[in-house]
Image: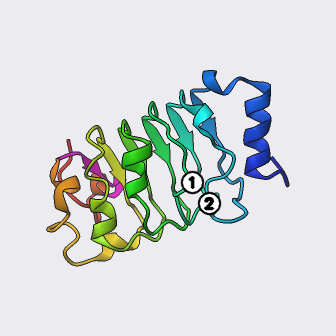
Amino acid sequence: VGNTSRSEVILTWSHTYRCLSIVELVVDNSRSADGEVEGLTDEFSTLEFLSMVNVGLNSLSKLPSLPKLRKLELSDNNLSGSLETLSEKCPNLTYLNLSGNKIKELSNVEALVNLKNLQSLDLFNCEITSLDDYRESGGEVVGRGFQVNRADQVGRSGCGPQV
């Protein structure tokens, strides 16, 4: 990708291929100029997998509606909130990786309670995992019994039972 911005990469893809046929999009390491989701539009409604790892996201407020999205990789960004946007824009998520973000409040994770299909939530290396009551008061999201954190698989900090 070089010095090309993420917006330019996405726009190139959308003009080269019809957005309506793209089901997988990876824009890892393509830095966001303003910490917002750039270049994605509602035209990408067929996306089932989206990876935006290490792109410098501070917010998800400009995320378009992605009704078919099942897997979302958002690790190693600067996200600390605005997770409620995911319930509105990506209602069919089954897998969400938020590892390495700045999530430190339980209320931010509880904002994911409306993601009824969510089966796996990765919060590894997020500040929230160091809270004393992280496991005990994980709220409804954690209480649903899905896998939370890859770290749980090796007995380190995590949140909730495995499936």
- Nearest the eye: 2 or 117: 117
Q: Amino acid at mark 2?
A: Glu
The location of residue 128, given as percent across then percent down, is: 34, 71
User: How many neighbours does mark 1 have within 10 angstroms: few (below 14), some (14-19), or many (20 or more)?
Assistant: some
Question: Regarding mark 1 in the picture, which secondary structure is present there?
Answer: loop
Q: CA distance from mark 1 to mark 2?
A: 6 Å
Q: Residue furthest right?
A: 3
Q: Residue at x 42, y 53 (%)?
A: 85
Q: Decide: marks 1, 2 in contact (CB < 8 A)?
A: yes
Q: Residue furthest bottom?
A: 132
Q: Amino acid at mark 1?
A: Lys
Q: Residue at x 29, y 64 (%)?
A: 156
The location of residue 135, given as percent across then percent down, is: 19, 66
Q: Is residue 67 left or right of residue 156?
A: right
The location of residue 29, given as percent across then percent down, is: 68, 54
Q: Is residue 23 left or right of residue 112?
A: right
- Nearest the eye: 63 or 52: 63
- Numbered label attached to residue 36: 2
User: How many neighbours does mark 2 have within 10 angstroms: few (below 14), some (14-19), or many (20 or more)?
Assistant: some
Please report the bounds of the magenta region as a residue range. 145-151
Quadrant of image for the C terminus: top left
Image height of 77 relative to 114, above or below: below
Residue placed under numbered mark 1 in the picture: 62
- Nearest the eye: 90 or 119: 90
Q: Residue at x 23, y 45 (%)?
A: 146
